[in-house]
Amino acid sequence: MDLYIKGILEMEILDFITISLLILIAITSISGVYLYFFSSKNNEEDTNSEDLKKINETLSSVQNNSNQIQAAVQSFKNPMDSLNRYLSGSAISGVVGEWGLEAIITETLSSNQYEKDFMINPETRDRVEFAIKMPEGLYLPVDSKFHSGIVDKYEKFIDLSVQGADVKDKLDEARKDILDSIKKDAADISKKYMQDGITVDIGIMFLASESLNLLIDTPDFKKRNKNTGIREEIYNEYRILIMGPNTFASYLTSVYMGFKTLSINEKAKEIVKDLGRAKKEFNKFNKSTELLIKGAESVLNRAREQGTRERAMSRVLENIDSDE
């Protein structure tokens, strides 16, 4: 997001400067034609001093307009450079950072997989910006933090250092301010938005600027933090993960795939249960078939027994007839 906004700002500045230069060139060209025209006219017709006075006034006007255009370009460029440095060197402040966080979550997860402005603890009424529903029924708190002012201050000291100024101590102090601010925010997230039975045992601090995420991993910041990485320290002490847009998007994608895998596993379990029920029904059917066969064999045996008795009775009757 920072690179996109930065690119737009650079294009706006370039377009404004280009248009201003074109206007300046056009004014200068017209003035040259005007000067040439009156000079030729003076040579041919020997115009009086009043014509020369008009020419001088025109040239003065052109010069004044040119100076005003240059001043306007510079007055436009200076604040844009400051804003450009602010957006590229620090977290995008306030609502813009929240928009970035919301954009990543809404584009990756479905609406039933997260809560916005979720109340973690009804007693304190603290609300986290986003709470992601995890498979185990708990929530993963995600909160964006902004360090624009102190990072902008650090960037200014960097510019002064490049220009040769001795600001080593001030740079070191600015690094400490950034690290202390991040630690304070991590403690704040851990205290307000992490609760047993409601959330998982980790939380996420979202820093909207990739530049800041890269900055805190540099050797100078690690050295200022007693040769300990700020990410490792915060995770070990507060169970908070620091993530930028790219890292968080990747992490959220893995969570989404976890949801998909869980859904597939649940469907597979349902299929296994259905197969189990079908197997039981088949076993019952098999047993009933066996009982039916046994019943049929019993009937057949009785029929055979009945036939044997009938033949025996027939022989007895035949013997009686022959005796008579």
Image: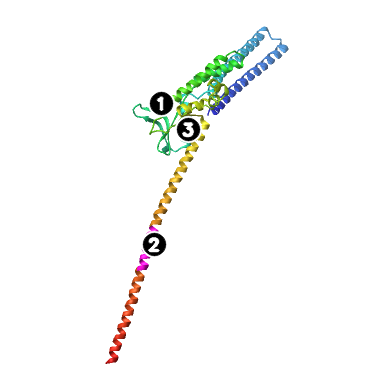
Query: Which residue is found at the position 33% from the left and 74% from the top?
Result: 302
Secondary structure under tag 2 reads helix
Which three-letter amino acid code belongs to the residue tagged 2? Asn
Q: Which residue is mark 2?
A: 286
Q: Is residue 103 above or below residue 67?
A: below
Q: Which residue is mark 1?
A: 191
Q: Answer whether residue 290 is magenta in the image.
A: yes
The answer to which of 128 and 45 lies nearer the viewer is: 128
Secondary structure under tag 3 reads helix
Report the residue that reaches farthest toward the left: 324
- Residue 171 in the image: state x and y as whole percent: 55, 17
Dots 2 and 1: beta carbons under 8 Å? no
- Residue 5 in the image: state x and y as whole percent: 54, 27
Q: Which contiguous range is marked in magenta?
A: 281-294
Q: Which residue is mark 3?
A: 103
The answer to which of 166 and 44 lies nearer the viewer is: 166
The answer to which of 70 and 231 lies nearer the viewer is: 231
Scheme of image coloration: rainbow
The C terminus - image quarter: bottom left
Q: CA distance from mark 1 to mark 3?
A: 26 Å
Q: CA distance from mark 3 to mark 2?
A: 58 Å
